[in-house]
Image (cartoon, coloured by chain):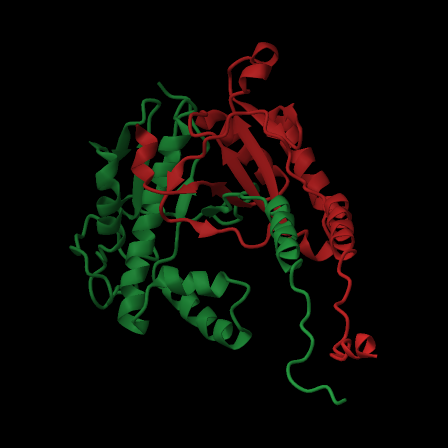
Chain colours: A green, B red
Protein backbone atom coordinates (compact mmCIF):
# COMPACT_ATOMS: atom_id res chain seq x y z
CA UNK A 1 0.00 0.00 0.00
CA UNK A 2 2.38 2.68 -1.14
CA UNK A 3 1.14 6.26 -1.18
CA UNK A 4 1.40 7.56 -4.68
CA UNK A 5 -0.06 10.51 -6.50
CA UNK A 6 -0.65 13.97 -5.14
CA UNK A 7 0.56 14.75 -1.65
CA UNK A 8 -2.11 15.75 0.85
CA UNK A 9 -3.28 19.28 0.33
CA UNK A 10 -2.78 21.92 2.95
CA UNK A 11 -5.99 23.54 3.91
CA UNK A 12 -5.70 27.04 2.59
CA UNK A 13 -9.11 28.16 3.64
CA UNK A 14 -7.86 30.51 6.31
CA UNK A 15 -5.21 32.09 4.12
CA UNK A 16 -7.65 34.82 3.26
CA UNK A 17 -8.21 35.54 6.92
CA UNK A 18 -4.51 35.93 7.50
CA UNK A 19 -4.16 38.19 4.53
CA UNK A 20 -7.00 40.36 5.70
CA UNK A 21 -5.48 40.52 9.07
CA UNK A 22 -2.17 41.72 7.76
CA UNK A 23 -3.95 44.21 5.62
CA UNK A 24 -5.84 45.60 8.55
CA UNK A 25 -2.71 45.73 10.65
CA UNK A 26 -0.85 47.76 8.07
CA UNK A 27 -3.84 49.95 7.44
CA UNK A 28 -4.02 50.82 11.08
CA UNK A 29 -0.35 51.45 11.73
CA UNK A 30 0.45 53.39 8.58
CA UNK A 31 0.11 57.09 9.14
CA UNK A 32 -0.64 58.85 5.94
CA UNK A 33 1.40 61.97 6.23
CA UNK A 34 2.60 64.56 3.81
CA UNK A 35 6.26 64.34 4.40
CA UNK A 36 7.52 66.53 1.65
CA UNK A 37 8.41 70.16 1.62
CA UNK A 38 10.96 72.83 0.97
CA UNK A 39 14.22 72.29 2.81
CA UNK A 40 15.93 75.42 4.00
CA UNK A 41 18.79 76.27 6.28
CA UNK A 42 18.39 79.17 8.67
CA UNK A 43 21.37 81.45 9.16
CA UNK A 44 23.25 80.99 12.45
CA UNK A 45 22.38 83.59 15.02
CA UNK A 46 25.89 84.81 15.69
CA UNK A 47 27.01 87.15 12.96
CA UNK A 48 30.04 86.14 10.90
CA UNK A 49 33.33 87.52 12.14
CA UNK A 50 34.28 89.21 8.97
CA UNK A 51 32.07 91.66 7.23
CA UNK A 52 31.76 90.79 3.62
CA UNK A 53 31.22 93.66 1.28
CA UNK A 54 28.73 92.78 -1.37
CA UNK A 55 28.21 95.00 -4.30
CA UNK A 56 24.72 96.23 -4.89
CA UNK A 57 24.52 94.73 -8.35
CA UNK A 58 25.08 91.26 -6.94
CA UNK A 59 21.99 91.44 -4.76
CA UNK A 60 18.57 90.59 -6.05
CA UNK A 61 16.17 92.14 -3.62
CA UNK A 62 12.74 90.54 -3.32
CA UNK A 63 10.16 92.17 -1.08
CA UNK A 64 6.71 90.86 -0.32
CA UNK A 65 4.27 93.28 1.20
CA UNK A 66 1.27 92.53 3.40
CA UNK A 67 -1.09 92.27 0.45
CA UNK A 68 1.06 89.68 -1.27
CA UNK A 69 2.46 92.08 -3.84
CA UNK A 70 5.98 91.50 -4.94
CA UNK A 71 8.77 93.94 -5.54
CA UNK A 72 11.90 92.63 -7.20
CA UNK A 73 14.82 94.93 -7.87
CA UNK A 74 12.82 98.09 -7.28
CA UNK A 75 9.94 97.24 -9.54
CA UNK A 76 6.55 95.76 -8.92
CA UNK A 77 6.28 92.41 -10.67
CA UNK A 78 3.84 89.58 -10.97
CA UNK A 79 4.71 86.53 -8.93
CA UNK A 80 4.58 84.42 -12.07
CA UNK A 81 7.45 86.36 -13.58
CA UNK A 82 9.63 85.88 -10.55
CA UNK A 83 11.22 82.65 -11.69
CA UNK A 84 12.26 84.02 -15.06
CA UNK A 85 13.62 87.17 -13.46
CA UNK A 86 15.59 85.22 -10.89
CA UNK A 87 17.06 82.99 -13.57
CA UNK A 88 18.03 86.02 -15.61
CA UNK A 89 19.75 87.50 -12.58
CA UNK A 90 21.59 84.36 -11.51
CA UNK A 91 22.61 83.34 -14.97
CA UNK A 92 23.72 86.79 -15.99
CA UNK A 93 27.48 86.33 -15.65
CA UNK A 94 28.32 90.01 -15.96
CA UNK A 95 32.01 89.71 -15.09
CA UNK A 96 34.17 90.33 -18.14
CA UNK A 97 36.07 87.37 -19.54
CA UNK A 98 39.53 87.13 -18.03
CA UNK A 99 38.46 88.33 -14.59
CA UNK A 100 38.54 85.71 -11.78
CA UNK A 101 34.77 85.74 -11.50
CA UNK A 102 34.18 85.03 -15.15
CA UNK A 103 31.43 82.48 -15.59
CA UNK A 104 32.00 80.36 -18.66
CA UNK A 105 28.81 78.31 -18.37
CA UNK A 106 26.41 81.22 -17.95
CA UNK A 107 24.01 81.77 -20.80
CA UNK A 108 22.57 85.04 -19.60
CA UNK A 109 22.63 88.54 -21.01
CA UNK A 110 26.07 89.37 -19.54
CA UNK A 111 24.68 92.68 -18.42
CA UNK A 112 27.38 94.64 -16.64
CA UNK A 113 24.87 96.15 -14.21
CA UNK A 114 23.56 92.80 -13.01
CA UNK A 115 25.26 89.96 -11.13
CA UNK A 116 28.90 89.07 -11.78
CA UNK A 117 28.62 85.31 -11.53
CA UNK A 118 26.30 82.74 -9.93
CA UNK A 119 28.66 82.28 -7.00
CA UNK A 120 28.55 86.01 -6.27
CA UNK A 121 24.83 86.44 -6.80
CA UNK A 122 22.70 86.68 -3.69
CA UNK A 123 18.95 86.65 -3.51
CA UNK A 124 17.64 88.59 -0.57
CA UNK A 125 14.09 87.92 0.55
CA UNK A 126 12.20 90.25 2.81
CA UNK A 127 8.63 90.00 3.95
CA UNK A 128 6.18 91.81 6.12
CA UNK A 129 4.79 90.36 9.33
CA UNK A 130 1.34 90.46 7.82
CA UNK A 131 2.30 88.53 4.70
CA UNK A 132 0.32 85.34 4.18
CA UNK A 133 2.34 82.18 4.64
CA UNK A 134 0.95 80.76 1.40
CA UNK A 135 2.36 83.68 -0.57
CA UNK A 136 5.70 83.32 1.14
CA UNK A 137 5.86 79.64 0.21
CA UNK A 138 5.00 80.45 -3.38
CA UNK A 139 7.87 82.93 -3.52
CA UNK A 140 10.24 80.46 -1.85
CA UNK A 141 9.10 77.83 -4.29
CA UNK A 142 9.79 80.06 -7.27
CA UNK A 143 13.23 80.98 -5.99
CA UNK A 144 14.17 77.37 -5.33
CA UNK A 145 12.63 76.54 -8.70
CA UNK A 146 14.89 79.06 -10.41
CA UNK A 147 17.95 77.44 -8.87
CA UNK A 148 16.68 74.00 -9.77
CA UNK A 149 16.05 75.00 -13.37
CA UNK A 150 19.59 76.27 -13.75
CA UNK A 151 21.09 73.28 -11.98
CA UNK A 152 19.05 70.95 -14.15
CA UNK A 153 20.40 72.67 -17.22
CA UNK A 154 24.00 72.21 -16.12
CA UNK A 155 23.38 68.64 -15.00
CA UNK A 156 21.87 67.85 -18.38
CA UNK A 157 24.92 69.32 -20.08
CA UNK A 158 27.44 67.48 -17.91
CA UNK A 159 25.74 64.22 -16.99
CA UNK A 160 22.68 64.00 -19.22
CA UNK A 161 20.19 63.83 -16.40
CA UNK A 162 18.29 66.21 -14.18
CA UNK A 163 19.85 67.56 -11.03
CA UNK A 164 16.66 67.15 -9.01
CA UNK A 165 16.55 63.52 -10.07
CA UNK A 166 20.19 62.98 -9.07
CA UNK A 167 19.69 64.68 -5.75
CA UNK A 168 16.59 62.66 -4.96
CA UNK A 169 18.48 59.46 -5.67
CA UNK A 170 21.38 60.63 -3.57
CA UNK A 171 19.15 61.44 -0.63
CA UNK A 172 17.18 58.23 -0.88
CA UNK A 173 18.42 55.88 1.87
CA UNK A 174 17.79 52.84 -0.33
CA UNK A 175 20.38 53.82 -2.90
CA UNK A 176 23.45 51.56 -2.71
CA UNK A 177 26.59 53.12 -1.30
CA UNK A 178 28.74 52.92 -4.41
CA UNK A 179 26.17 54.79 -6.49
CA UNK A 180 25.81 57.33 -3.74
CA UNK A 181 29.52 58.04 -3.60
CA UNK A 182 29.49 58.66 -7.31
CA UNK A 183 26.42 60.86 -7.09
CA UNK A 184 27.80 62.82 -4.18
CA UNK A 185 30.58 64.33 -6.27
CA UNK A 186 28.26 65.12 -9.13
CA UNK A 187 25.65 66.72 -6.91
CA UNK A 188 28.32 68.71 -5.16
CA UNK A 189 29.77 69.91 -8.42
CA UNK A 190 26.43 71.11 -9.75
CA UNK A 191 25.64 72.77 -6.45
CA UNK A 192 28.91 74.62 -6.63
CA UNK A 193 28.11 75.91 -10.08
CA UNK A 194 24.95 77.53 -8.76
CA UNK A 195 25.30 77.78 -4.99
CA UNK A 196 22.03 78.59 -3.28
CA UNK A 197 22.53 81.92 -1.62
CA UNK A 198 19.27 83.08 -0.25
CA UNK A 199 19.42 85.56 2.52
CA UNK A 200 16.39 86.23 4.65
CA UNK A 201 16.39 89.36 6.66
CA UNK A 202 14.32 89.52 9.78
CA UNK A 203 10.83 90.56 8.94
CA UNK A 204 10.20 94.22 9.04
CA UNK A 205 6.91 95.74 9.93
CA UNK A 206 6.74 98.41 7.34
CA UNK A 207 3.50 99.70 6.04
CA UNK B 1 -14.88 -7.62 5.98
CA UNK B 2 -15.42 -5.23 3.14
CA UNK B 3 -16.60 -2.76 5.70
CA UNK B 4 -13.05 -2.30 6.90
CA UNK B 5 -11.40 -2.47 3.53
CA UNK B 6 -13.15 0.60 2.31
CA UNK B 7 -10.93 2.81 4.33
CA UNK B 8 -7.95 2.11 2.26
CA UNK B 9 -6.92 5.53 0.97
CA UNK B 10 -4.35 6.12 3.58
CA UNK B 11 -3.65 9.85 2.97
CA UNK B 12 -3.13 11.92 6.08
CA UNK B 13 -6.25 13.26 7.69
CA UNK B 14 -6.68 16.98 7.03
CA UNK B 15 -4.96 19.18 9.51
CA UNK B 16 -7.24 20.82 11.96
CA UNK B 17 -7.00 24.54 11.33
CA UNK B 18 -9.82 25.62 13.55
CA UNK B 19 -7.43 27.18 16.03
CA UNK B 20 -5.55 29.16 13.42
CA UNK B 21 -7.82 32.22 13.45
CA UNK B 22 -7.47 32.40 17.21
CA UNK B 23 -3.72 32.43 17.00
CA UNK B 24 -3.75 35.03 14.30
CA UNK B 25 -6.16 37.19 16.24
CA UNK B 26 -3.91 36.91 19.20
CA UNK B 27 -1.06 38.21 17.09
CA UNK B 28 -3.22 41.00 15.82
CA UNK B 29 -4.16 42.13 19.30
CA UNK B 30 -0.56 41.89 20.38
CA UNK B 31 0.56 44.22 17.62
CA UNK B 32 -2.37 46.52 18.12
CA UNK B 33 -1.55 47.07 21.73
CA UNK B 34 2.20 47.31 21.27
CA UNK B 35 2.24 49.74 18.36
CA UNK B 36 2.47 53.30 19.51
CA UNK B 37 0.72 55.58 17.13
CA UNK B 38 2.21 58.85 18.12
CA UNK B 39 0.32 61.41 16.22
CA UNK B 40 -0.72 64.40 18.19
CA UNK B 41 -4.27 65.43 17.54
CA UNK B 42 -4.43 68.67 15.69
CA UNK B 43 -5.97 71.54 17.52
CA UNK B 44 -5.27 74.03 14.81
CA UNK B 45 -6.42 74.30 11.25
CA UNK B 46 -3.71 72.95 9.07
CA UNK B 47 -4.21 73.37 5.36
CA UNK B 48 -0.69 73.31 4.06
CA UNK B 49 0.29 75.39 1.06
CA UNK B 50 1.28 73.81 -2.24
CA UNK B 51 4.75 73.78 -3.69
CA UNK B 52 6.26 72.05 -6.68
CA UNK B 53 9.97 72.00 -5.86
CA UNK B 54 9.61 69.73 -2.87
CA UNK B 55 11.99 67.26 -1.35
CA UNK B 56 10.85 64.21 0.53
CA UNK B 57 11.47 64.00 4.24
CA UNK B 58 13.00 60.58 4.43
CA UNK B 59 13.70 59.68 8.01
CA UNK B 60 10.81 60.17 10.35
CA UNK B 61 12.80 59.68 13.52
CA UNK B 62 14.82 62.82 12.90
CA UNK B 63 11.94 65.20 12.57
CA UNK B 64 10.44 67.53 15.11
CA UNK B 65 7.04 68.89 14.17
CA UNK B 66 5.67 72.33 14.87
CA UNK B 67 2.11 73.13 13.90
CA UNK B 68 0.81 76.62 13.34
CA UNK B 69 -2.67 77.74 12.44
CA UNK B 70 -5.96 79.11 13.57
CA UNK B 71 -7.46 77.18 16.51
CA UNK B 72 -10.22 74.86 15.36
CA UNK B 73 -13.82 75.76 16.06
CA UNK B 74 -13.98 73.99 19.42
CA UNK B 75 -11.01 75.94 20.76
CA UNK B 76 -11.99 79.20 19.17
CA UNK B 77 -13.81 80.43 22.25
CA UNK B 78 -10.83 80.02 24.51
CA UNK B 79 -7.97 80.85 22.22
CA UNK B 80 -9.47 83.25 19.72
CA UNK B 81 -9.03 83.21 15.99
CA UNK B 82 -5.46 84.40 15.74
CA UNK B 83 -2.91 81.86 14.53
CA UNK B 84 -1.42 79.81 17.32
CA UNK B 85 1.49 77.45 17.69
CA UNK B 86 0.81 73.88 18.67
CA UNK B 87 3.65 71.89 20.21
CA UNK B 88 2.83 68.27 20.92
CA UNK B 89 -0.68 68.53 22.30
CA UNK B 90 -0.95 72.03 23.58
CA UNK B 91 -1.07 75.59 22.42
CA UNK B 92 2.12 77.52 23.04
CA UNK B 93 3.73 80.85 22.58
CA UNK B 94 6.65 81.55 20.30
CA UNK B 95 9.10 81.73 23.18
CA UNK B 96 8.28 78.14 24.20
CA UNK B 97 9.58 76.84 20.89
CA UNK B 98 13.21 76.90 21.95
CA UNK B 99 12.58 74.82 25.07
CA UNK B 100 10.44 72.41 23.12
CA UNK B 101 13.16 71.85 20.54
CA UNK B 102 15.77 71.30 23.23
CA UNK B 103 13.47 68.84 25.00
CA UNK B 104 12.75 66.92 21.82
CA UNK B 105 16.42 66.91 20.99
CA UNK B 106 17.30 65.46 24.38
CA UNK B 107 14.84 62.64 23.79
CA UNK B 108 16.53 61.50 20.61
CA UNK B 109 19.53 59.19 20.55
CA UNK B 110 22.90 60.86 20.71
CA UNK B 111 23.85 60.27 17.11
CA UNK B 112 20.68 61.89 15.80
CA UNK B 113 20.78 65.00 17.94
CA UNK B 114 22.77 67.01 15.47
CA UNK B 115 20.89 66.02 12.36
CA UNK B 116 17.37 66.87 13.41
CA UNK B 117 15.08 68.67 11.02
CA UNK B 118 12.27 70.89 12.19
CA UNK B 119 9.19 70.44 10.06
CA UNK B 120 7.06 73.54 10.09
CA UNK B 121 3.49 72.63 9.33
CA UNK B 122 1.96 76.01 8.91
CA UNK B 123 -1.51 76.79 7.70
CA UNK B 124 -1.39 78.73 4.48
CA UNK B 125 -3.52 81.51 5.90
CA UNK B 126 -1.22 82.12 8.85
CA UNK B 127 0.77 85.32 8.98
CA UNK B 128 4.48 85.41 8.45
CA UNK B 129 4.96 87.23 11.76
CA UNK B 130 4.42 84.11 13.81
CA UNK B 131 6.60 82.08 11.44
CA UNK B 132 9.38 84.64 11.75
CA UNK B 133 9.15 84.44 15.53
CA UNK B 134 9.50 80.66 15.34
CA UNK B 135 12.44 80.93 13.00
CA UNK B 136 14.10 83.36 15.35
CA UNK B 137 13.62 80.95 18.25
CA UNK B 138 14.98 78.08 16.18
CA UNK B 139 18.07 80.09 15.40
CA UNK B 140 18.58 80.74 19.09
CA UNK B 141 18.73 77.01 19.87
CA UNK B 142 20.75 76.33 16.75
CA UNK B 143 18.10 74.18 15.08
CA UNK B 144 18.89 75.53 11.67
CA UNK B 145 17.58 72.82 9.42
CA UNK B 146 13.95 73.49 8.69
CA UNK B 147 11.49 72.05 6.28
CA UNK B 148 8.44 74.00 5.25
CA UNK B 149 6.10 71.09 4.87
CA UNK B 150 3.79 71.48 1.91
CA UNK B 151 1.54 69.50 -0.33
CA UNK B 152 2.85 68.72 -3.74
CA UNK B 153 1.10 70.82 -6.31
CA UNK B 154 1.00 74.06 -8.19
CA UNK B 155 2.44 76.79 -6.00
CA UNK B 156 0.27 79.47 -7.59
CA UNK B 157 -2.82 77.92 -6.09
CA UNK B 158 -1.74 79.42 -2.76
CA UNK B 159 -2.48 82.86 -4.04
CA UNK B 160 -6.17 82.35 -4.53
Above-or-below relation of B70 to A133: above
**Where residue B51 appears, x then y in whole percent?**
37, 42
Q: Residue at x 65, y 49 (%)?
A: A25
> In which quadrant will I find the C terminus of chain A?
top left
> In which quadrant will I find the N terminus of chain A?
bottom right
Residue nearest the observer in this picture, A79 or A125: A79
Q: Is residue B43 visible?
A: yes
Res. B74 image quadrant: top right
Res. A186 image quadrant: bottom left
Residue nearest the observer in this picture, A21 or A97: A21
Horizontally, residue A77 falls left or right of residue B141, namely left
Residue nearest the observer in this picture, A131 or A7: A7
Horizontally, residue A18 falls left or right of residue A183, namely right
Above-or-below relation of B9 to A79: below
Q: Which residue is drawn at 29% across and 43% down?
A: A60
Above-or-below relation of B71 to A122: above
Q: Which residue is drawn at 42% across and 66% down?
A: A187
**Where residue A97 appears, x then y in whole percent?**
20, 66
Q: Is residue A192 visible?
A: no
Amino acid sequence: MSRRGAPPEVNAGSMADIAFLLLIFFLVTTTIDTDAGLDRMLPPIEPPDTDVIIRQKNIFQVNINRDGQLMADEELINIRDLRAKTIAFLDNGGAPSGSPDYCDYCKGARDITSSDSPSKAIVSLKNDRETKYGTYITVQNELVGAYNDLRNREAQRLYNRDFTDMEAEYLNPETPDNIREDLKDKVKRIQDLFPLKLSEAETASIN
Amino acid sequence: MSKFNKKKDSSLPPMNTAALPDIVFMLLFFFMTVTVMKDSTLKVENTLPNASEVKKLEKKDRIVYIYVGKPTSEFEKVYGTESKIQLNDKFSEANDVGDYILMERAKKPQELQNVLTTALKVDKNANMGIVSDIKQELRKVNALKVNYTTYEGDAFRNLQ
